[in-house]
């Protein structure tokens, strides 16, 4: 009997020691100071934290030796006030609460200042189809911030930016609508929401063609001179919705083989197989024969020293003639 009693006492001692080791049942709730400290353990908060603005504990139910803290938190990352829900799982161990898991769910942001305007301008980048179809990236393009609408309370902004360039009577302008959104992890990010493009080539003036030679030429003789009077301009436009429009009011007057011509021009399709279609290439068709035609071209070439513009004439058979604007 005494032996059984001793065994019982030993078991009670072991249980008591275990209770002391594990701290027994929780004797308090998690303090606000500890919740705030543990909330800052998340690396992405630590990386940009300026201060905690507020912590509002919604609930912290205790079940056994576990406590689930749910709180609304607002912190200042230096650029914005970030609001979210913080959830921390605690376990009671060694007579204190220990955070074992912390999660943050983003809710909203209020930004202090608008984005750096230079970042907005940089977001107005090249549009691939405009470069391939119109060579819109030729020559210097100067981005200009036209307008902006800011809603810093929700970390959003909208901008209109233009990029323009010109050479030899050709002007091209791309207009961008850029959306700015502030992300609490990455800061301001920008996307092109919409764009539209318009180019105009001013062909009006007096021109002279001096035809070159080619063994396959069937229409023009080597050194033949043609003088042209051109009136009007050609414009092309394209937008993100793939709606393309062209406006032509160009007329060409010249005399060849004693026959006077005064005819409208169309856009040349010679380079459509490589995706190039522009107001800089025009076609003059003046007779009934297939070779009764020639092109005028304002060509762009990207050389080692930069973009170079040149004007040429091209016959149906591919013979090149020099094209010079007289006035």
Image: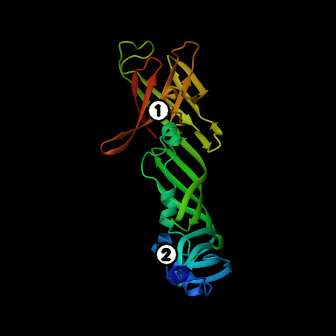
- Point out which mark residue 297 bears: 1
Picture layout, residue 33 above or below residue 266: below
- Residue of label 2: 41
Work out whether residue 109 or residue 289 is closer to the camera in this orientation and state it: 109
Display colour scheme: rainbow
Residue 212 located left or right of residue 196: left
* Quarter of the picture holding the N terminus: bottom right
Q: Is residue 313 left or right of residue 156?
A: left
Q: Residue at x 58, y 46 (%)?
A: 197
Image vertical order of residue 17 relative to residue 275, above or below:
below
Q: Position of residue 194 (x, y in %)?
A: 62, 51
How many neighbours does mark 1 have within 10 angstroms: few (below 14), some (14-19), or many (20 or more)? some
Residue 16, image x, y percentages: 54, 83
User: Does dot 1 land on a helix, a strand or a loop?
Assistant: strand
Side of 116 where 244 appears, left or right: right
Q: Say if 297 sits above or below 116 in the image.
A: above
Mark pair 2, 1: CA separation: 66 Å
Q: What residue is shown at x 42% (from left), y 31% (from top)? A: 312
- How many C-alpha atoms fall within 10 Å of the one at disc 2: few (<14), some, or many (≥20)? few
Residue 111 vs 198, above or below: the answer is: below
Which residue is nearer to you in this view: 209 or 217?
217
Residue 73's image quarter? bottom right
Asked whether 126 or 40 is in front, the reply is 40
Q: Position of residue 191 (x, y in %)?
A: 56, 55
């Amino acid at each position: 009997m005494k032996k059984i009693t001793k065994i019982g006492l030993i078991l009670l001692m072991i249980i008591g020691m275990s209770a002391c080791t594990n701290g027994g049942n929780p004797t308090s709730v998690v303090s606000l100071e500890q919740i705030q400290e543990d909330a800052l353990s998340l690396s992405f908060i630590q990386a940009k934290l300026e201060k905690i603005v507020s912590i509002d504990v919604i609930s912290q139910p205790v079940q056994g030796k576990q406590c689930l803290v749910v709180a609304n938190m607002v912190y200042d990352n230096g650029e914005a006030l970030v609001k979210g829900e913080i959830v921390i799982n605690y376990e009671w161990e060694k007579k204190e609460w220990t955070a074992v898991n912390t999660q943050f769910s983003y809710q909203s942001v209020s930004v202090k200042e608008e984005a750096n305007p230079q970042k907005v301008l940089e977001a107005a980048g090249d549009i691939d189809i405009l470069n391939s179809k119109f060579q819109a990236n030729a020559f210097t393009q100067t981005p200009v911030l036209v307008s902006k609408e800011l809603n810093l309370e929700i970390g959003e902004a909208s901008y209109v930016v233009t990029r323009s360039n010109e050479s030899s009577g050709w002007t091209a302008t791309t207009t961008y609508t850029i959306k700015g959104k502030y992300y609490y992890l990455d800061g301001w990010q920008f996307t092109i929401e919409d764009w539209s493009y318009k180019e105009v080539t001013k062909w009006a003036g007096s021109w002279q063609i001096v035809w070159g030679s080619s063994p396959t030429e069937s229409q023009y003789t080597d050194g033949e001179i043609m003088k042209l009077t051109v009136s009007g301009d050609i414009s092309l436009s394209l937008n993100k919705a793939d709606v393309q429009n062209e406006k032509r009011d160009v007329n060409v007057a010249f005399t060849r083989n004693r026959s006077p011509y005064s005819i409208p021009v169309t856009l040349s399709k010679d380079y459509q197989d490589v995706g190039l279609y522009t107001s800089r290439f025009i076609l003059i068709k003046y007779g009934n024969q297939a070779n009764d035609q020639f092109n005028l071209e304002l060509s762009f070439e990207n050389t080692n020293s930069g973009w170079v513009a040149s004007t040429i004439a091209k016959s149906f058979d591919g013979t090149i003639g020099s094209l010079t604007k007289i006035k």
